[in-house]
Image (cartoon, rainbow, N blue to C red):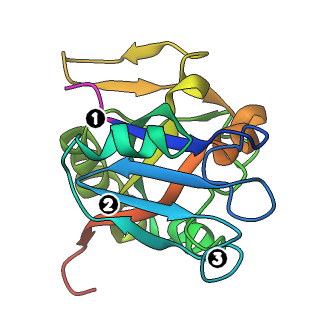
Amino acid sequence: MTGSLDVVLSRAGYDTPRPGARSGSGAMLSHGRGHLTGATDDDEGPGQEAEVAPSSNSRDLPAARAAGWRLMETVTLWRPTGPQELALVEASGWRAWPPRLADQPIFYPVLNEDYATRIARDWNVRHSGAGFVTRFDVARSFLDGYEVQQVGGETILEYWIPAEHLDALNANIVGRIEVTAEFRAEGR
């Protein structure tokens, strides 16, 4: 599997919002992992998320299109991370990856949870005492500018995002970065 495909719908008549935009850039409705959520300036307040139509049924999409929403694809990515990087993600409100360190010229999100789990469990725990698997969605239109890199076996797939493109990646994250698994060294 090379990442999962979700869709995002943005309201026609607005400037095209960047994926994940919450305030002052128009309305957004995202469909992924079995539900529709929306965030608009008209909801509970700028930047607030509100459930629009809890359903995994694609029958909701024509109604959304008829209401003026347009389709945009997203890709689900995973990232193994240690506690220091995770603390910086949390400080961003779970919406952005921190700048790379001087010796980290590339940001490596991966395309499947199993690969991320192996890195978090086997590498991050050994080097920092804890490892975390995160999941996040990115606009496919952004990722189309990058090739998927196969760096080992058939399922060892990742994107290589140059450090200087990280702000653009962050601007194309749809929703929040989520922790899906946690691993700790014994005794911690």
Tags 3 and 2 touching, CB below 8 Å: no
Residue type, mark 2 in image: Arg
Give the Cα separation between the discs numbered 3 and 2.
24 Å
Q: Which mark is residue 4?
A: 1
The x, y position of residue 59, in whole percent, is 23, 42
Tell me: residue 80, above or below residue 148: below
Q: Which residue is mark 2?
A: 126
Q: How many marks?
A: 3
The x, y position of residue 104, in whole percent, is 65, 40
Dominant secondary structure (helix, strand or loop) of the stretch shown in magenta: loop
Q: Which mark is residue 128?
A: none
Q: Which mark is residue 91?
A: 3
Q: Nearer the viewer, residue 153 or 54?
A: 54
Which of pointers 3 and 2 lies earlier in the amino acid sequence? 3
Q: Nearer the viewer, residue 39 or 112?
A: 39
* Magenta highlight range: 1-5
Tell me the mark number nearer the camera, choosing from 3 and 1.
Answer: 1
Give the Cα separation between the discs numbered 3 and 1.
27 Å
Q: Nearer the viewer, residue 158 or 129?
A: 158
